[in-house]
Amino acid sequence: MTRILLADDHPMIRTAIEVLLRDTNYEIAATAGSAAETLAKLDDVKPEILLLDLSMPGGSGMEVARKLHSNGGGPHIVILTAAIDDASLLETGTLGVKGMVLKNSDPAYLLECLDRVRSGGTWIDPELSARAQELSETYGERQRPSLAPRERQLIRFVRQGLRNREIAKELGVTEGTVKVYLHTVFEKLGVSSRTELAIRADEFLAESYLKK
Amino acid sequence: MGRGLQLASGRVIALGRLLLAILFVAIVWSKADHVVIAPIRSSALLIAYGAFALLVALATWKSWWLDARLAGPAHAIDIALFTALVYFTEGDNNPFLTFSVFILLSAAFRWGWRATTLSAILLALLFVLSAVLPGIPAVKLQFSDFASGAGQLLILSVILIWFGVNQWRSAIRGEAADLLAEPSADSLPLENGLRAAMAAVRASRGAFVWASNPRKSIALLAEDGAITEVKPAVVPVPAPQPFLYDLREARALMRDTDGNLREFDPAEHVRSENASALVLSDGLAIPVVTDRGQGQMFLEEIRGLSTDHLLVGAEVSAAVASYIQRRALMKAAEENAESRSRLAIARDLHDSVVQFLAGAAFRLEAMKRSQASGRELTPELDELKELMLQEQSELRSFITALRSGSQIELAELAKDLQALANRLARQWHVQCSFSLEEKELMVPARLHLDAQQLVREAVANAVRHAGAKNVSIRLAGEEDGVTLDFINDGATYAKGPEGDRVPRSIKERVEAAGGDMEISRGMGVTRISVSLPLTRRAA
């Protein structure tokens, strides 16, 4: 039996997946409804696969994936989501995500994906893999300087509408340092304002992951 | 001018007093036998005055507090010295008469026209009194000397009183100030700006050419009290400062950054297309530049047009730009609120319908697999049917809520009104308190906007028309709506045929929202009680 931690806050999905995995080689060892609960239960349950929704209260599934990636080791991550933006889609490739299934795809895909991941492979939803391909064709030709992880983080904060002081607090640096970072990012990307950076954040983040 | 004397009329007055005192001592010493009666007493008096002037200058140079506190006593001593100088000096060729200019000018600088008028009357009385008082036998009053002195004093007084009346008075007052007060969501910023500018300079005709971006321009023409749009609009390069123009003579005057008048050809900043489309001839042009766009107003048929209007124009330019900017910010905030509610709807749909359908698909897949393994499907089918019925009912109430507009909690509305009350208190310099009678209630977004607008209008009205110093706002949730009470300690509203005349702007807004209002007076306060329904009644 392969033990799964199911991280999804929607009760309908939780029940449905439990029913779907009945009589299979998978067992739902625990469920979690938020990013914090997921991280806490991972330690307790030690599952082989984390079935992760991206949109959860109190922090997104991407944050959980980033955290697991930076800690190293951990379970295989399979993302099960209703939607994913371009930047996150490309970032998953750098975070060692093994599987991705869209909730609006054929439910049979989930079992196919789990089987592939369990046997050490990767499985990406056809719709998402076509999108990733398209993104790399759109941006791949362009020559843009790559962004450091810290700079990507900064762009994400700017996109969320955080002010310099708040960003400084989040990153644990001074406001002056944030200004220097921002200036470097502006220079690198050739943007002239914070608003432009926020509006085009998705594009820059997506491109920066393609450079990895 | 040195930095020490910029924006420091107190220092200029103190320094002027000291220099005059030194000059007086010099005059007395040089012409003692010719001019002054009792020269020793006079010069002793002047030396004492010089010492006093020095002390005042030293004490007030770096202290705005002492400057303000000593201004009155020093002014009284100046007047007393003037009287003494007139009294102790020979009538003809009195060198001290111009001292009155200093006294009146300092009053005009410091206190405005009332103090200047009082000082002028007092000086005139003391001048007459010192001339007719029996005193030192050598003083002989000549009528011609007296008339000349009194005449000079009178003319100077009138000029300085006028100066006192006009020097610090804002051009944005009365109707202009009303038009440029807090902008509302449905106000027309360019029209109001043009009307306010015309009111400020008393122009009978005006035009406003405006471009919010290079491709979108508009020209408004105000004639005979009506504003019409004129096409096509050509937006000239706004001038750096307001300028006077006379297109027939191809003349224009503007003040440069040093305040000097500079002549130039008005063609560049007016454009011949505008001159013919808007029938411009001569008047005052005021540039208006904001980060939402730029334009220029042309105000014509101004009575007594003069270079003074350039200063008024600069003030109007800043006020109109700030008004347009505030209106744009307000509109952006509203659009932001709209897009937030769209996002909220999208999120709600994602969280409910999309997730449910995905879940249902997983359940069906599970059932398909169960069927293959020969399992009984009826219980699962029943469960899925039950879930679908529940979801359907939730979806129906979601759609009902959408139809009635996006909703916010009463507590959220209260939070916004509290912030607004604090802002209005600062804006109008009044005490403005807000309280909420707690109740679990959701209110539609439209009511939220109506309530905010009513608070703005009620406070502005209480201050402007009733002279209130305290306004208290109470919000309470009812079964089918909310009530807003505005209590102010201002004067009674004017009586109409049906009792107290209710402020029109408030009345119209309440009626448009399908609500009711009552106005009552007692214990020295006026209470306007407004009730707004959650759903609009058909008008």
Image (spheres, coloured by chain):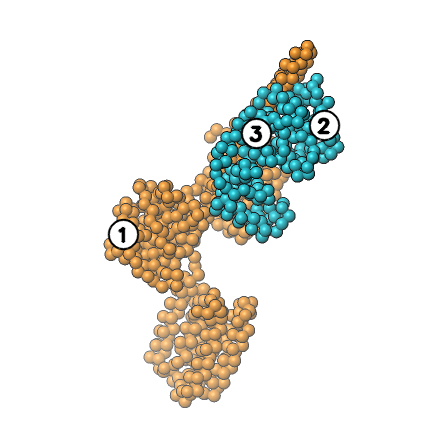
Chain colours: A cyan, B orange
Give the side of residue A25 with respect to residue B104, left or right.
right
Q: Where does residue B363 sit, x and y in percent of width and height?
A: 64, 18
Label disc, if present, on residue B281 of the rendered structure: 1
3 and 1 marks in contact (CB < 8 Å): no
1 and 2 marks in contact (CB < 8 Å): no
Instruction: Label 1: state its secondary structure.
Output: loop
Three-letter amino acid code of the residue under disc 2: Ala
Residue B299 can be seen in this image = no
Q: Where does residue B305 sit, x and y in percent of width and height?
A: 32, 57
Q: Mark 3 points at which residue?
A: A83
Is A133 located above or below residue B224 in the figure? above
Q: Which of B427 and B138 is in front in this view?
A: B427
Q: Residues within 10 Å of mark 1 (few under 14, many from 20)?
A: some
Please identify the residue farthest to the bottom as the structure is shown.
B33
* Image mark 1: chain: B
* Image mark 3: chain: A
The tally of labels here is 3
Q: Nearer the viewer, residue A120 or B537?
A: A120
Instruction: Single out the mark in the foreground, 3 or 1.
Output: 3
Three-letter amino acid code of the residue under disc 1: Ser
3 and 2 marks in contact (CB < 8 Å): no
Instruction: Label 2: state its secondary structure.
Output: strand
Residue B217 can be seen in this image = yes
Q: Mark 2 points at which residue?
A: A30
